[in-house]
Image: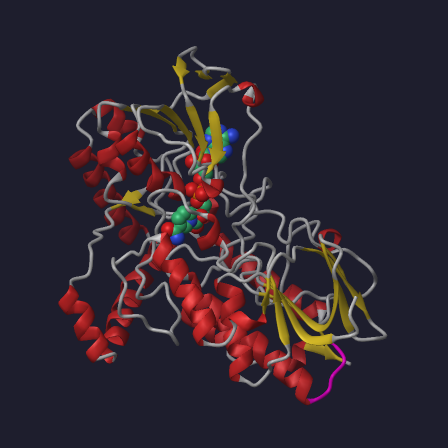
């Protein structure tokens, strides 16, 4: 371990880590390092390279407010352009030089006397820092269910977040388990190449038309010439996506029913077989799980060589999948579009706070974090995209920027005042959490038992139940009366 004690160490160089890096530099807090486990920055936009990977929020809003971009090719950009945008931001704002790759953090222990964290990496490296920030996101450990017989499958198989580009799908019989946001994006692309595709759907999702299109050259030129137009356009998209918040409110049936009718109309228009159409209509209210946007998913399913299988999977056999009603699907390739391990938070990181208690013990009942950012007993530790800060309706980067500004402000004051430690008071954290849980009860997410927003006990630990403006107000300044300062 070197003798250097950093002011700040960040874990993860995705959108969150880069956003905080920009904020720290803006405030002259240049003594920070971003530890990145992979060999390059990018987070989810580096890992998810599946065909058709793109954003489900228009790019004018799924981009930093401080780094408007006039050259998006599509309204909803594709993964390569989003990754290159993030790389460009890291370079332009001087954050790239603060990134150290190949450093997978496996633990961090608080040392009260020294007022520092000791951070451990899988490669044996250790670091010291006064403040530590997690920017590891909520969706980065692929979840591959242990289905009976899975290990016997003789063909190629992979998870959507670890796409095997070495295997050509041309002329192959492909099975896809799952039909969530990722699968709905790659199934249409897979169907263009494969001889046949079987989609194993367990639960239908609400899908709305994306109405995607490429931007015209004159539009890009206009925005380059008059950058304020980009701001206006961003504001328009913000207002439109914000409307979806109404669908997330449990009591707001009207707006939800309008969207459900639109979605059902979309199914009828694209799927001519009534039996298939019926299987695509969800049996839970729109908004209870992530609403998907796609122009090409239903048309892909409508093709003769694509089959929607809704019988449960009984077992995987060497040659394919057998369903619970005995149908045998012969497959050459099996792709898991089965999402991510979203609980517990800070998976595989042994974070130990004031009394040596691990974060996973502290969070045994529920992952509680004040404003989703600070955890009592874990001084000088902050989270970006922490518990209950995910959104169901608009760009997550709005939340990221609020958190980055809050955390940078806290670190700035800690440094300026030469405080050793700031630790949120348990009473403040519990009061915040109790109110949050009450509000979650009013949201539509509670009306299904099966979503990645919830733990096995049905507790929603991922989502923020308010609007983004409210969260921005909540995090506009650090309320130091809620923290114990040493
Ligand atoms: P997901 O929404 O969690 O979908 C996982 C799918 O796998 C579901 O259809 C699920 O069925 C199925 N599944 C899981 N375990 C299974 C099992 N044992 N047997 C059969 N089926 C099983 O995962 P995702 O599609 O990767 O998306 C996750 C989140 O990532 C999204 O909600 C979104 O927030 C984000 N995302 C964003 C974008 C973007 O455009 N920005 C793109 C992709 C993903 P059930 O529904 O029955 O559980």
Task: Name which residue lies at 65% across and 49% down.
Answer: 347
Which residue is the extreme one toward the front? 166
Query: Which part of the image, by quadrant, shows the C terminus?
Result: bottom right
Picture coordinates of residue 151, whole percent (x, y): 57, 22
Residue 296: quarter of image: top left
Ligand 1, seen in the image, is in the quarter at: top left
Task: Name which residue lies at 53% across and 42% down.
Answer: 142
Q: Is residue 478 visible?
A: no
Q: Is residue 229 above or below residue 45?
A: below
- Read off the magenta span: 417-421
Picture coordinates of residue 363, whole percent (x, y): 69, 53
Horizontal side, residue 4 vs residue 288: left or right: right
Query: Which part of the image, by quadrant, shows the N terminus?
Result: bottom right
Horizontal side, residue 481 vs residue 171: left or right: right
Residue 233: quarter of image: bottom left
Please count the marks in the image.
Answer: 0
| Most common SS among magenta residues | loop
Q: Out of 466 and 35, give the one closest to the viewer.
A: 35
Residue 423: quarter of image: bottom right
Q: Is residue 117 above or below residue 195?
A: below
Horizontal side, residue 31 vs residue 48: left or right: right
Q: Is residue 155 visible?
A: yes
Picture coordinates of residue 410, whole percent (x, y): 62, 79
Task: Name which residue lies at 42% across and 38% down.
Answer: 165
Horizontal side, residue 315 vs residue 362: left or right: left
Which residue is the extreme one toward the right? 113
Q: Out of 16 and 92, give the one closest to the viewer.
A: 92
Does the segment drawn in magenta span residue 282? no
Picture coordinates of residue 91, whole percent (x, y): 46, 72
Which residue is the extreme one toward the top? 326
Q: Out of 324 and 315, give the one closest to the viewer.
A: 315
């Amino acid at each position: 371990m070197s003798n250097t004690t950093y002011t700040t160490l960040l874990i993860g160089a995705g959108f969150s880590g880069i956003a905080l890096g920009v904020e720290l530099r803006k405030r002259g807090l240049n003594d920070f390092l971003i530890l990145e486990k992979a060999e390059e920055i990018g987070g989810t936009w580096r890992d998810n390279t599946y065909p058709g990977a793109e954003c489900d929020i228009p790019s004018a809003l799924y981009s930093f407010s401080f780094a408007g971009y006039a050259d998006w090719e599509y309204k909803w950009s594709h993964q390569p352009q989003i990754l290159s945008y993030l790389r460009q931001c890291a370079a332009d704002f001087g954050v790239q030089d603060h990134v150290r790759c190949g450093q997978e953090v496996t633990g961090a222990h608080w040392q009260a006397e020294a007022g520092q964290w000791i951070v451990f990496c899988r490669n044996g490296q250790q670091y010291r820092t006064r403040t530590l920030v997690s920017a590891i996101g909520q969706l980065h450990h692929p979840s591959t269910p242990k289905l009976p017989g899975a290990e016997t499958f003789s063909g190629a198989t992979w998870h959507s977040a670890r796409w095997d580009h070495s295997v050509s799908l041309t002329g192959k019989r492909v099975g896809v388990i799952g039909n969530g946001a990722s699968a709905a994006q790659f199934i249409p692309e897979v169907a263009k190449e494969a001889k046949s595709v079987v989609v194993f759907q367990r639960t239908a999702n609400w899908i709305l038309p994306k109405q995607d299109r490429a931007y015209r050259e004159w539009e890009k030129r206009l925005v380059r010439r008059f950058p304020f137009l980009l701001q206006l356009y961003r504001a328009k998209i913000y207002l439109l996506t914000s409307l979806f918040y109404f669908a997330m409110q449990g009591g707001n049936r009207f707006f939800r029913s309008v969207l459900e009718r639109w979605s059902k109309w979309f199914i009828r228009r694209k799927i001519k077989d009534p039996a298939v159409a019926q299987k695509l209509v969800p049996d839970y209210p729109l908004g209870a799980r992530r609403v998907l946007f796609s122009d090409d998913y239903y048309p892909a399913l409508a093709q003769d060589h694509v089959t929607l299988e809704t019988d449960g999977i009984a077992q995987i056999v060497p040659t394919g999948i057998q369903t619970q009603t005995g149908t045998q699907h012969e497959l050459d390739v099996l792709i898991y579009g089965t999402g991510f391990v979203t609980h517990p938070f800070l998976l595989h990181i042994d974070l130990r706070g004031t009394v040596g208690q691990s974060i996973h013990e502290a969070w045994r009942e529920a992952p509680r974090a004040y404003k989703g950012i600070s955890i009592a007993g874990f001084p000088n530790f902050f989270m970006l995209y922490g518990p209950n800060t995910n959104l169901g309706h608009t760009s997550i980067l709005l939340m990221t920027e609020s958190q980055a500004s809050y955390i940078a402000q806290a670190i700035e004051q800690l440094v300026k005042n030469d405080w050793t430690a700031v630790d949120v008071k348990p009473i403040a954290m519990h009061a915040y959490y109790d109110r949050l849980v009450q509000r979650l009860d009013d949201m539509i997410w509670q009306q299904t038992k099966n979503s990645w927003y919830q733990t096995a006990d049905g507790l929603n630990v991922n989502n923020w139940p308010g609007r983004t403006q409210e969260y921005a107000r909540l995090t506009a300044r650090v309320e130091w009366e809620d923290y114990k300062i040493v």
